Every structure is written in C-alpha cells, then in structure tokens.
Image (tube, rainbow, N blue to C red):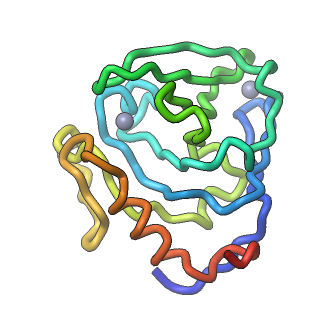
Amino acid sequence: MGECRVSLPLAGGCQCGAVRYRVSKRPLTLYCCHCAECQAQSSSAFGMSMPVERAALSVDWASMKVWTRPTDSGARLECHFCPTCGSRLFHVGDRDPDIVSVKAGSLDNADVLRPIGHLWTDSAQPWFEIPRGAVAAARQPETMDAFLGRWSEATAGWFDDAD
Ligand SMILES: [Zn+2]
Ligand SMILES: [Zn+2]
C-alpha cells in the first residue's frame, strides 16, 4: 500500500457545507460495501464505510436529519444526513452505538485513505473488479475482525497520533 502520512483530525462535511465534522482519532477500518442498501443509499455502485469511535467524532448531531432502517441482521440503523443537500454522512447501529460509520466519500481529502476491503461482493456490480489482495466477504461476515486487522497492518505508522 505504500508510505502515507495522515494528519489528525480528519475533516469532512456534506456537499453544501452546512454540516462539518472532525475525527480526532485514527479510524478503525475503511471498506467498500456493495450491498443493495449501500447502492441505494449512495445512488452509486457501492458505499464507503469508515467506522470511528463516537467520542472521536465532533459534529452538531442536531443539525442533521435522521432516517432509521432495519438491517439484514435485525438491528436498527440510524442514518444521519444533511437536511439541505441530502448528503448521507453517518450511520449508527443500535447494537454498537459507540461506533459511528462515517461515509468516507464526505472527507475533504478522501483520496489519502484507501479502503482495505470489500463487503457483500455477491451483489457487487458485475463490472467492478475486487482489487487483488483486498479483504473480501461475499455477504455480512460473522465478525469484522479481518477488516479491522488488515487496516491496522496496512496503516501502521500512517497517523500522527502515534498509537
Ligand atoms: Zn449539506
Ligand atoms: Zn452495505
């Protein structure tokens, strides 16, 4: 994956700029999800998910609108978005409310962080080629351990918080 230096906090926001956020600690992982829900949510081929500790995310939660949907596994997922431009920014599941999944395309410098894995490859668009060597799961895996582990390895030394 190559050398990379990333300064914290990471900053991002919605398309119109009304909602801005900052992430003060290194993300837990970064992957693409090719499930039908992420395709519908992004109006595109896949979604990008960057789970972070809720405490490391600063944003004005009240400035966003929330839509809630059930997940494949029967959990409830809160989907937070800008009420003005509609950009989806965060997902929070009721089974793990201390983790926020940041929609990583909303980062100001989305290009500095490269996804290490691909989820729900069974429903990926047929033209999309899963990069060789990426962590991949056909559907929802039992645990996200492989995605978390690969990210730790791949980004060792990247972040300036030195953990
Ligand atoms: Zn907006
Ligand atoms: Zn998905």
Viewer-closest of 58 and 39: 58
Point out the image quarter for the C terminus: bottom right
Q: Quadrant of residue 112?
A: bottom right
Query: Ligand 1 is in which quadrant of the figure?
Result: top right
Apparent side of residue 102 relative to residue 6 in the rendered image (left or right): left
The residue depicted at 46 percent of the width and 77 percent of the height is 153
- Can you give x and y, in whole percent of width and height, for residue 27 in the image? 60, 57
| Image location of residue 38, percent across then percent down | 39, 32
Q: Is residue 158 above or below residue 115?
A: below
62 or 35, nearer to the observer: 62
Residue 22 x, y percent position in the rendering = 78, 48
* Depth check, front residue: 81 or 86: 81
Q: Residue furthest bottom?
A: 3
Q: Quadrant of the N terminus?
A: bottom left
Image point (64%, 43%), residue name: 106
Q: Quadrant of residue 78?
A: top right
| Residue at (62, 82) in percent of width and height | 157
- Going by the image, does 63 lie left or right of 40? right
Q: In this view, does 129 lie to the left or right of 55?
A: left
Residue 162: percent from left, percent from top = 72, 78
